[in-house]
Amino acid sequence: MLLERDLIQSVGFRNVREGDRVTGFQFRVRMPSYRGMAASLIDGIAVRVGDLVDVGADVPRWTFAGRTYTLAELWDVDGVRWPLEQAAIVTVPLDGGLPDGVHEVSIELRLRMSYIPEEHQPSTYRETRHITLSPEAAGGPFKYGVSLYSFMTDYGTVLDLETALAAVADVGATGVEILGEGHIAGYPEPTTAWIDRWFELLEQYGLEPTNYGSWIDTRLHSSGPNARGLSAAEGAGMLQRDLRLAKRLGFGFVRPKIGVVSSDLVPDPIWTESVERSLDLAQELDVVICPEIHSPTPIKHEVVDGYIDLIERTGTKHFGLLLDTGIVQDRPIPLRPGELPGQRPAFLDGIAVDPADIADIAKYVVFIQAKFHDIDDQLEDQQIPWVPVLRALKDAGYTGYLSSEYEGERIPWRSIEQVRRQHSLIRRIADGLD
């Protein structure tokens, strides 16, 4: 498992309880040195949280390998180490704990280095970071998950599978969504060892597989002198391959990303036959095929009508709609450095679908990708109007997953904190709905 670069880790920031009482809060700190060291060399950690907490270096308690120590106890122990690859758990006593929300956490960590002259000791490391307390709100009628797509560009560089799943579980989510060819080593034929490890990690972090992202690459042979379109049989083969793999990994939903033929995402005409050829297998595997309604396609559109027509015509229970909340975006995504107005697709400014339109299709919706781009330090989403969206879903009777899909700035590790903010925000809103 990998650690975040910051000394103060975002994963692990939470209130702690003794019975029914909140007695403090804790966070994790990685070793700032180039090596691990004996825990008895720790000289304390002063902690400040905004204007709520300011404690001296001797107050917090330390946890290593499941055992908790006061600072004085650490000074007298032998054999307890702070490894380079493991974060220490720091617990600060605070009756009632911290309130929900984003907090400015500052530390002054002191370590004694035996090979540095004593007059220059202790070695002191200071850091301040804004991090969101793990949400405690139940979140109303919904279930909560995270798509590993949220960690794109981090995944495989600064996050591995276990680190990603640990981050998902840390916000109290119970569901995990993956992309078949994005997160499965050896796709489409993962090893037995990889599959075993997948299930071990799911059990370890208390997660269930939700939605599996698949592709029907209709432009597979679209280049060169022998260019041709993909046949419906070939499209069905791609879909069925992933239906089987998704089932092996425990998923109940498969989202096929179907090749498009227009700027408003009208799918290639082979989609209908490719799906219909696969419905019997989906029923046999008990997996639901669910293409997404994704910006710039609104709810009131021929694409959505076509999906609903297939459901009504076949009577299938194994085809439904996946709703991506990017369609309700009502404020623009800021221009990136060097990007000029008019250089990018207009839908990035938002197509502002009325959340009330959800009622028209709610009975066909089986999964929600909770798309978002940026949530600020005040826990305000800069693009998505969550209050009317969540109210519309609740009023429509939706009780399934809201699966976080962060698609904002890709600074390393930023996605982890942004997902924490979204879960804190939408759970609080959902709890407060009438």
Image (cartoon, helix red, strand yellow):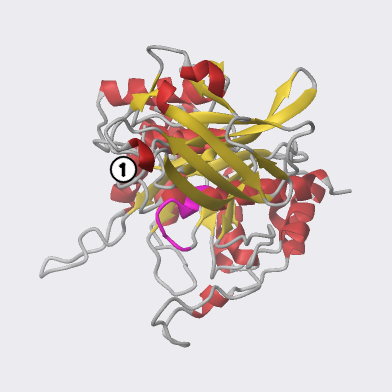
**Which x, y percent locates residue 219?**
27, 62
Decide if residue 211 is in sight here. Answer: no
Q: Magenta region: which residues?
A: 409-416
Of residues 32 and 366, the one drawn nearer to the viewer in this rendering: 32
Extreme left residue here?
225
Question: Mark 1 highlights which residue?
Answer: 237
Of residues 37 and 225, the one drawn nearer to the viewer in this rendering: 37
Decide if residue 383 is in sight here. Answer: yes
Extreme right residue here?
434
**Which x, y percent locates residue 183?**
35, 41
Q: Give the residue drawn at x 40%, y 12%.
A: 78
Asked if residue 413 is among those painted magenta in the image, a careful observer would answer: yes
| Amino acid, disc 1 | Gly
Q: Give the residue drawn at x 78%, y 31%.
A: 95
**Which x, y percent locates residue 259?**
37, 61
Report crowding for label 1: few under 14, some 14 to 19, many 20 or more residues within 10 A (C-alpha): some
In which quadrant will I find the N terminus?
top left
Image check: 330 left or right of 42?
Answer: right
